[in-house]
Image: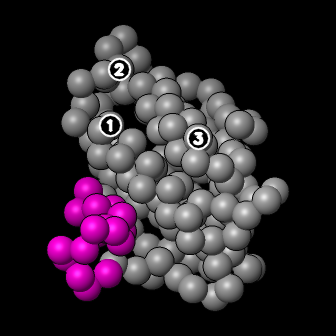
Amino acid sequence: MGEARDGAVIGEVTLPGVLRSVGCARGFVRDAVLARSRRDDPVLDDMVTVASETVANAIKHTASGLEGGEVRVVLRDVGGVYRLEVGDDGAAGARPHVKDEVGAETGRGMRIVAALASRWGFRADGHRTVVWAEFPAPAPAAGSRDGGGAPFGGRG
């Protein structure tokens, strides 16, 4: 399930490991994609939903949700594919997976990720885990030659 880092960084942000960061991550992904694509592209909602699920999981299930924890969100353009990456502060070796129970009240986050992304996986980065999900790159915004723009990001 590992995957090497590659591709041009569209944007990145580091957020505190608190629940309000889930909304910040959604806004970050939406703004980063809209800076390069049309507003009506259906993949945008899928990317925002996956960002929400993966950031919420990082905060709930890893050290990112502890005092001083952080979550890092990176959006890359990998040759016509957008790769969303969410890095957490580690979960003592536990790794993300799709749960078998489909009717449970909780635990559906990675099932949602698997359903919406073209592919997904994770890689270890020291004690941290980076969950990635790939999507077809949205169509460029009208009037844009390449859909490009300067990378943006920072700390939330």
> Circle 3 sits on which residue?
20
Question: In the picture, residue 11 is in which quadrant?
Answer: top right
Q: Position of residue 144 (x, y in %)?
A: 40, 17
Amino acid beneath label 3? Arg
Residue on which the image places disc 1: 44
Magenta region: which residues?
99-116
Q: Residue furthest top?
A: 143
The answer to if 100 sits in the magenta stretch is yes
Question: Which class describes the residues within 10 Å of circle 1: few (<14), some (14-19), or many (20+)?
Answer: many
Discs 1/3, front: 3
Residue, far left: 103
Secondary structure beneath label 3: helix
From the top left corner, tell me how far across and down residue 141 is, in percent.
35, 20
In which image quadrant can residue 59 be found? bottom right
Q: Nearer the viewer, residue 47 or 4?
A: 47
Q: Which residue is painted at 23% across and 63% down in the image? A: 115
| Crowd rating for badge 3 (residues with CA inside 10 Å; few <14, some 14–19, many 20+) | few
Residue 10 visible to the viewer:
no
Q: Is residue 5 magenta?
A: no
